[in-house]
Amino acid sequence: MGIYLNPGNDLFWAAKNSEIYVDKSGLISYTNKVLGSEQRFICVSRPRRFGKSMTANMLTAYYSNGCDSAALFDDLEISSDKSYKIHLNKYDVMHFDIQWFLSASANAGDMINLLQREVVRELHNCYPEDIDENIDNLALALSRLYGKYRKQFVFIIDEWDCIFREDQYDHSAQKAYLDFLRGLLKGPAYVKLVYMTGILPIKKYGSHSALNMFDEYSMTNPGELARYVGFTESEVRQLCIRYDMDFEETKRWYDGYHFKKYPHIYNPKSVVDAMRRREFDSYWTQTETYEALKIYIDMNFDGLKDDIVMMLGGGRCKINPRTFQNDMTDFKCKDDVLTLLIHLGYLSYDIVEKEVCIPNSEVEAEFANAIEGAGWKEIIKAFSASEKLLKETINKNSDFVEKSIQEMHMETSILSYNDENALSCVISC
């Protein structure tokens, strides 16, 4: 058992022993189904703090032959699947946390060299007669093991896209990294399964992808993996019963991610924190400042600000997510920015209607913070007046309410006056 080769199950033990653990092991039935097939390449993109690393640790614990994980999985959903014992702890697993390698390197080029050097060293420790520790090409080392022993590997790659988020403008390094992954994974028979996870889908160059063998499951279309994006409504109901928390209030705060078969998916990080603390608050958005959102709003492609205000009023916006290049810099139009905000979790996408909206109260508050820092004086004034308006509405002061709504409607002049979404935004404020 090593650090990268068969690292064991300690991290999944920690997750399962937490105060709140929601069983998502049903995902393994899908990965077992595609194991060793043409569909063995899986790329799953999710927003930050949506359980990506926990899933990677779960798959590592299940497949790795460097540990015995029966006690971890025997009481989980996957244990009832007929494939459960067939694949439990049966494979050599390569688990790479790309964020860690990048943090330990001066640049992306050094990161690739560091990863190969460290993993080859572990392979040498296991196969000293077959692998020279001075080999600088991981694909070559793995090919030698396959050639001699027909040995195949399960690859679990976490934070695969961190280069595109942290070195946003270093396109040559990004391309070198994609070429490295393609050389390591595309074609060799030693690949039994690849589960790759991050925030962004796979980067495109022009109309092509260097990793076009992957099936992608993203926030615009998670397909059959939709129920693993976050918590389902039934899972949240059970947690609300267990912790004596109001379900409807939980729904208002943390629901809002809509998919075909699962129209109500909840932010898992926020639900867990709300249950544990017995208090509704913005937990997910506290892990990143509103500046990240403000940057994209300030771009104001094609009247983006108007659409943000419309969505703050409960409206929806039509978009085409297909032009997005799956990075954080190559924006050609408003739809590209809105699509990025989907992948970051700030917007929810309806694949049937091809529309986006703000998912819930937690994220709505983050948008309010962002526009306050962006100098939208008219909108800020409308938000500031909302508390007084609510009080006078409760007091049935119809004259004040009528006058206030009229004034706010006129002052939010960045929208058309005769637009129901403009009035909706005023009332929402």
Image (spheres, rainbow, N blue to C red):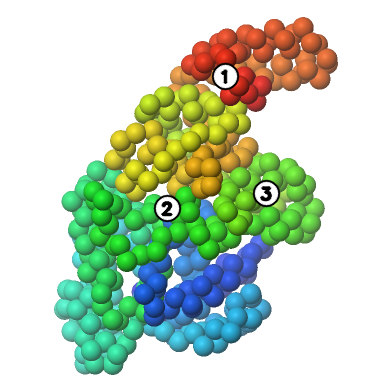
Q: Nearer the viewer, residue 25 or 288?
A: 25
- Residue at image position (51%, 44%) is 349
Residue annotated with mark 3: 274
- Mark 1 residue element: loop
Residue annotated with mark 2: 199
Left or right: residue 114 versus residue 324 is left
- Residue at image position (25%, 81%) is 142
Q: Are marks 1 and 3 in contact (CB under 8 Å)?
A: no
Q: Amino acid at mark 2?
A: Ile
> Could you tell me which quadrant the N terminus lies in?
bottom left
Left or right: residue 65 versus residue 150 is right
Q: Amino acid at mark 1?
A: Asp
Cα–Cα gap, marks 1 and 3: 37 Å
Residue 305 point in image, percent of width and height? 45, 25
| Quadrant of residue 179 within the rendered picture | bottom left
Q: Nearer the viewer, residue 390 or 32?
A: 32
First reached walking from the N terminus: tag 2 or tag 1: 2
> Could you tell me which quadrant the C terminus lies in?
top right
First reached walking from the N terminus: tag 1 or tag 3: 3
- Residue at image position (62%, 51%) is 263
Residue 99 point in image, percent of width and height? 36, 58
Residue annotated with mark 1: 419
- The total of numbered circles placed on residues is 3
Above or below 22: residue 94: below
